Amino acid sequence: MNSRSIRRPSSLCRLNSSMNILGRGAEAVVVEHDGVVVKERLKKDYRVAVLDERLRRQRTRRESSILKKVNALGIPSAKFLDMDDKTMEVEMSFVQGKKLRDVLDNHVHFAEQIGKIVGKLHTNDIVHGDLTTSNLLVHEDVVSVIDFGLSFISKKVEDKAVDLHVLHDAIKSRHYDVHEECFNLIIKGYSHSNPNASEVLERLKVVQSRGRNKK
């Protein structure tokens, strides 16, 4: 893990017109310049400074570690380039493609690829933590998964089932007319790439049942 200054055209605090802001959320700012993406975790003034720094450093390191593991597995995603745990930045390659949320309704077949990707992640104990069609991109018929900011390593069947539950609800909310067909294809792909799929899918039924009972 590096602690040196990341190679980039300018600090995120000095944004210039040549830098494209890809996202700005509660946790981080993500910018792109010449095919390189830099994600900076933002300081939280409402947290005790020492705790804030520790949390941001842990999350920056964890995201970097998971992204490197995803790359090693050959899962389509951004390529890890660098990490700076002093400035809380992760540098990665830019991923071409449209957000799946904008094309899935008319291209339901991509759902099977999604299932295969999630199945491979779970087989290797990677829980994405924020599986939505905004964090899936498609380019030349290849689906890529992005944004591992909430990801973590877990062997727990429960965590993997919850990951699928989040994906199911995201698709149902955004792509209601095709959500059943989509999720059936996701399960098909997931079962193909995860040898322990049956165990996770059984737990998914329990997780979904809990959600219905709360309502």
Image (cartoon, rainbow, N blue to C red):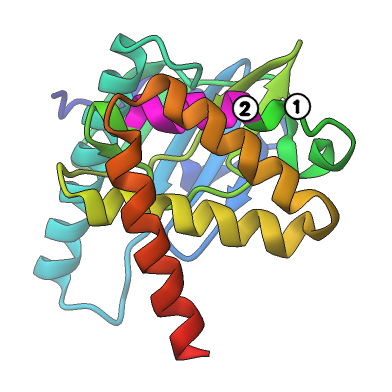
Compared to 101, does 106 lie above or below? Answer: above
| Furthest residue in direction right, as rendered | 106
Who's the residue at 47% across and 66% down the image? 26
Disc 2 crowd, CA 10 A, few/some/many (<14, 14-19, 20+)? many
**23 on left or right of 27:** right
Measured as percent of width and height from the top left, residue 37 is found at 52, 27
Question: Are the two marked residues, 2 and 1, in contact with CB atoms closer than 8 angstroms?
Answer: yes
Q: Nearer the viewer, residue 112 or 128?
A: 112
Considering the whole magenta stretch, tell me its main secondary structure. helix
Q: Determine if the magenta segment contains residue 97.
A: no
Question: Is residue 208 shown to the viewer in this render?
Answer: yes
Q: Magenta segment range?
A: 112-121
Measured as percent of width and height from the top left, residue 22 is found at 64, 41
Task: Tell me the SS state at disc 1.
Answer: loop
**4 on left or right of 208:** left
**13 on left or right of 54:** right
**103 on left or right of 20:** right
The picture quadrant where one finds residue 209 is bottom left
Compared to 26, does 196 lie above or below? Answer: above
Question: Is residue 10 shown to the viewer in this render?
Answer: no
Indicate the amino acid at tag 1: His
Compared to 56, does 14 lie above or below? Answer: above
Who's the residue at 47% across and 58% down the image? 165
Image mark for residue 112: 2
Image mark for residue 109: 1
